[in-house]
Amino acid sequence: MTTGRAAQARRAADALRQRIVAGEFANGRLPDEQALGRSLDTSRNVVREALNLLRDENLVTRRRGIGTLVTAHTYRHGLDRLAGLAEELTPYGTVSNEVREARVVPHAPPAITRRLDIPERSEAVYIERLRWLDGGPLSLDSTWLAPDIGHPLLHRDLAGRDLFALIEEVTGAALGSAEVTVHAVTAEPDTARVLDVAYGAALFAIDRLTRLPDGRPVDVESLRVRADRFALRAVLPRS
């Protein structure tokens, strides 16, 4: 069966996206269409359509007389160990946090109290931070903490420190484990404005419940991360 050009372009875009995310084009510029066609074993027309798909994803920009440029670095976050986003991103550049909210909520939502395994209508601490990497917004992080963990954090350096490290200082023990769910969402108007993306742009939604070594839940997080600047990676053994 003959494969249509649209399907060929999609497959070529997938291959190029993997190479971009892997950092293969370190100088920020892709080879010309003819060279890309040879490397992908496809025609220049298919390559052109593939590059247009990547441009629509905001991964590349195409400039007459210059060529195709990677729009921004894509930063990788591992899923094979428990680490805060800032811990993983520090090697890539300067990480900073804008603290948008940090407060005690007298009656936390029932969905939060259930996940934190605290009494219904009890208080919890809410922290919302906008994370910046090398001067550009990367993620909007919403965090709910059990009150005995969260209260001391309100007096710590929330703008300059990773929450996981602060939680471990407060509890005096390393965190135990986390349950992580990743799915795709589109940016609604407020999040789009905060993250400086177009309304409806693709985002990673990362929901995480973190536990102490004894299994007690202490931290419920919801992260909205720009998909054009971020990739998830893992090395998974087959058991």
Image (cartoon, grey):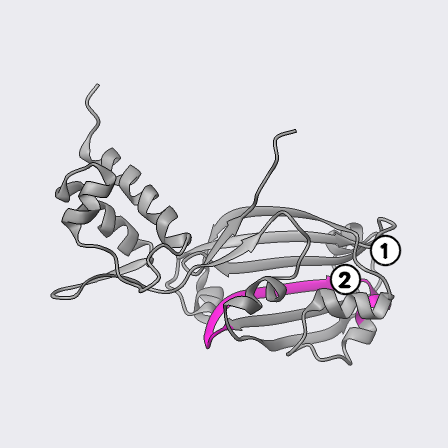
- Residue 123: which quarter of the image? bottom right
Q: What residue type is labelled 1?
A: Ile
Q: Where is residue 167 in the image (x, y as percent from the top left)?
A: 78, 66
Q: In which quadrant of the rendered view does residue 146 lie?
A: bottom right
How far apart are the two marked residues, 2 and 1, measured between alpha carbons?
Answer: 10 Å
The residue that appears at 63% across and 47% down in the rendered structure is: 80
- Left or right placement of residue 5 versus residue 231 in this view: left
Residue 86 against residue 212 in the figure, above or below: below
Q: What residue type is labelled 2?
A: Ala
**Tag 2, which secondary structure?**
loop
Contact, CB < 8 Å: mark 2 with mark 1? yes
Q: Callout 1: few (<14), some (14-19), or many (20+) C-alpha neighbours within 10 Å?
A: some
Is residue 124 visible in the rendered structure shown here?
no
Residue 136 within the segment the image draws in magenta: yes
Quick one: 209 or 201, which is closer to the camera?
209
Q: How crowded is mark 2: few (under 14 residues within 10 Å), some or many (20 or more)?
A: many
Residue 225 included in the magenta stretch of the image: no
Q: How many marks?
A: 2
The residue carrying mark 2 is: 108
Question: Is 138 in front, or is 23?
Answer: 23
What stretch of residues is rendered in magenta? 133-150
Q: In this view, does 1 lie above or below 59?
A: above
Side of 186 where 77 appears, left or right: right
What residue sits right under mark 1 in the picture? Answer: 118
